[in-house]
């Protein structure tokens, strides 16, 4: 295997959403990720299961003491564990942190849930939208007078959950290799989503961020940081924050109205947004791309999924790849000496059980 995580062994308990995404990230960068699937696994495997790519699978019935013991033997040889059950589930199965860390004191035991391992809501059901609602992140999305806009499940599940768990696991592995001590990582999506909003808490404290939506520089309140419809019904994005970039925007859009000269006067932002919206409706998206794309205006067309995969910049960087006929994002980030790689499509449940046990030196 190649990648900066080559030699790192990870055991991942079957889950949906952010758990598999975290496993995918580690696998893409070279970790040997073994997924434990139950006898009634919902994973179908194959190329269309993009976040299930790059790992191997063993099928274990964790209600069977013999299979629990096999699982423990795997964990004895692992560097890290990924699990996303409600608090207490693995303890009931005999696979809680106390038991597992007694067998492997160097293991980094990664637990990812929406609400965290403790707190009044810890054992309640929930989904991404609920978790980001509790942190203030959801409140800040959308337009004033409109309902908060669900921003896909990028902030809670993937940003606040999977990425923070991957970050925590790798920090834990570094610590374990230096000290011989493993530990438990409590990766709550509420904690991670809250952490992602850190800059805005600083801006609030400084008095430069208002709590009402659509009234700030980065939430659509500013005329120079927003999305605008073009004459063909498509959209472009403008992020001309710095004065020199803003001046270039005015030049490229042929804006001579003196009202635009006082860029940071918030009182004028609503009126200027209406004016610049009318200007962008005078040309097609492609015409605006010809004028602004690749310049310092801070401009990009708003692309749909298919357009994103075929945009020349993404093609040049091979940002998207095709595996068995399925287009998907390539591994990220990029490493100059130890590049990551996709290690095959998602496995069928239990597909590699015998090979895994033999390779890891386990008899069952």
Image (cartoon, rainbow, N blue to C red):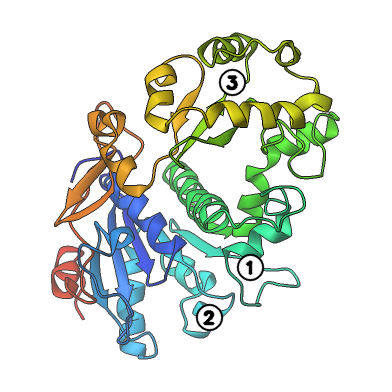
Q: Secondary structure at mark 3?
A: loop
**x and y percent of residue 75 in the render?**
36, 67
Image point (14%, 57%), residue name: 324
Nearest to N terminus: mark 1 or mark 2? 2
Q: Foreground: 121 or 292? A: 292
Task: Tell me: 238 left or right of 11.
Answer: right
**What is the number of the mark on residue 117?**
1
Which residue is depicted at the point 32% across and 42% down?
Answer: 307
Q: Is residue 225 visible?
A: no
Left or right: residue 156 versus residue 207 is left
Q: Image point 19% across, 71% down: which residue?
A: 357
Mark 3 — residue? Answer: 240
274 versus 148 height, above or below? above
**SS at circle 1:** loop
Left or right side of 359 for 127 = right
Q: Is residue 83 left or right of residue 269?
A: left
122 and 76: which one is in front? 122
Q: Which mark is residue 89?
A: 2
User: Which mark is drawn over residue 43?
Assistant: none
| Dot placed on the residue nearer the N-terminal end, 1 or 3 | 1
Q: Quadrant of residue 244?
A: top right
């Amino acid at each position: 295997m190649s990648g900066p995580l080559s030699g790192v062994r990870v055991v991942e308990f079957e889950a949906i959403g952010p758990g598999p995404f975290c496993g995918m990230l580690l696998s893409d960068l070279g970790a040997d990720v073994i997924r434990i699937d139950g006898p009634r696994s919902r994973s179908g495997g194959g190329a269309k299961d993009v976040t299930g790519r790059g790992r191997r699978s063993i099928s274990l019935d964790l209600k069977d003491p013999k299979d629990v013991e096999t699982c423990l033997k795997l964990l004895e040889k692992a560097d890290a564990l990924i699990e996303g059950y409600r608090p207490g589930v693995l303890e009931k199965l005999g696979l809680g942190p106390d038991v597992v860390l007694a067998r492997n004191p160097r293991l980094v035991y990664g637990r990812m849930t929406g609400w965290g391992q403790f707190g009044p809501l810890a054992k309640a059901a929930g989904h991404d939208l609920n978790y980001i609602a509790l942190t203030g992140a959801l409140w800040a999305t959308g337009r004033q007078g409109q309902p908060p806009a669900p921003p896909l499940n990028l902030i809670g599940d993937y940003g606040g959950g999977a990425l923070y768990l991957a970050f925590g696991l790798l920090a834990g592995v570094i610590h374990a290799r230096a000290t011989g001590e493993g530990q438990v990582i409590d990766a709550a999506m509420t904690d991670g989503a809250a952490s992602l909003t850190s800059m805005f808490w600083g801006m609030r404290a400084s008095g430069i961020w208002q709590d009402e939506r659509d009234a700030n520089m980065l939430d659509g309140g500013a005329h120079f940081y927003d999305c605008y419809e073009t004459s063909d019904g498509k959209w472009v994005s403008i992020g001309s924050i710095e004065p020199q970039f803003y001046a270039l925007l005015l030049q490229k859009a042929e804006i001579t109205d003196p009202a635009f000269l006082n860029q940071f006067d918030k009182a004028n932002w609503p009126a200027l947004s209406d004016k610049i919206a009318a200007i962008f409706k005078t040309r097609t998206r492609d015409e605006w791309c010809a004028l602004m794309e690749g310049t310092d205006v801070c401009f990009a067309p708003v692309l749909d999924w298919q357009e994103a995969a075929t945009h020349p910049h993404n093609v040049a960087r091979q940002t998207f790849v095709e595996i068995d006929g399925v287009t998907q994002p390539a591994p990220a980030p990029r490493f100059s000496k130890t590049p990551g790689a996709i290690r095959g499509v998602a496995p069928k449940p239990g597909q590699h059980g015998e090979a895994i046990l033999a390779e890891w030196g386990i008899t069952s």
